[in-house]
Amino acid sequence: MRWVVGMMAGPVLWAVLFAAVYALHGIGCAWGWTGVAAPFGSLHIVAMAGVWLAGLVLHVGILAAAPKGPAREARLHRMGAWIGLVASGLTLLPVLLTSTCG
């Protein structure tokens, strides 16, 4: 059963990041964070990018901790880690690059 947890760690982390980044997007739009200056842009973008980058670091940690070798369980663990990493990188990047606050 441990291999199921390992296999699902990447996709579950993606789901958590997806929810967190979109929650910050809504909160930032509602509270006017786009107009608040921060060292690397608006507070809105910096907050979302910080969560996204922290999540990518966690994804790399999951991938590094994945078991090595040709065994089915090890391969499934690595595939789950890669799926989560790529999904987090690709699906959340557009949110950081564009602003849809009205």
Image: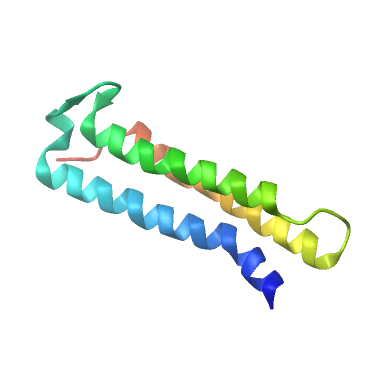
Which color scheme did the rendering employ for the protein? rainbow
- Residue 44 occupies quadrant: top left
Which residue occupies 42% across, 53% down?
17
Q: Is residue 62 above or below residue 71?
A: above
Q: In the displayed structure, does residue 32 sit left or right of residue 42?
A: left
Quadrant in the picture for the N terminus: bottom right
Which residue occupies 62% across, 70% down?
5
- Residue 18 occupies quadrant: bottom left
Which residue occupies 30% across, 32% down?
46
| Residue 80 % position (x, y) | 65, 59
**Residue lying farthest to the right in this orientation:** 70
Asked whether residue 80 appears in the rendered view, the answer is yes
Which residue occupies 57% across, 48% down?
59
| Residue 48 % position (x, y) | 32, 40
| Residue 54 % position (x, y) | 45, 42
**Residue lying farthest to the front in this orientation:** 65
Q: Nearer the viewer, residue 61 or 79?
A: 61
Quadrant in the picture for the C terminus: top left
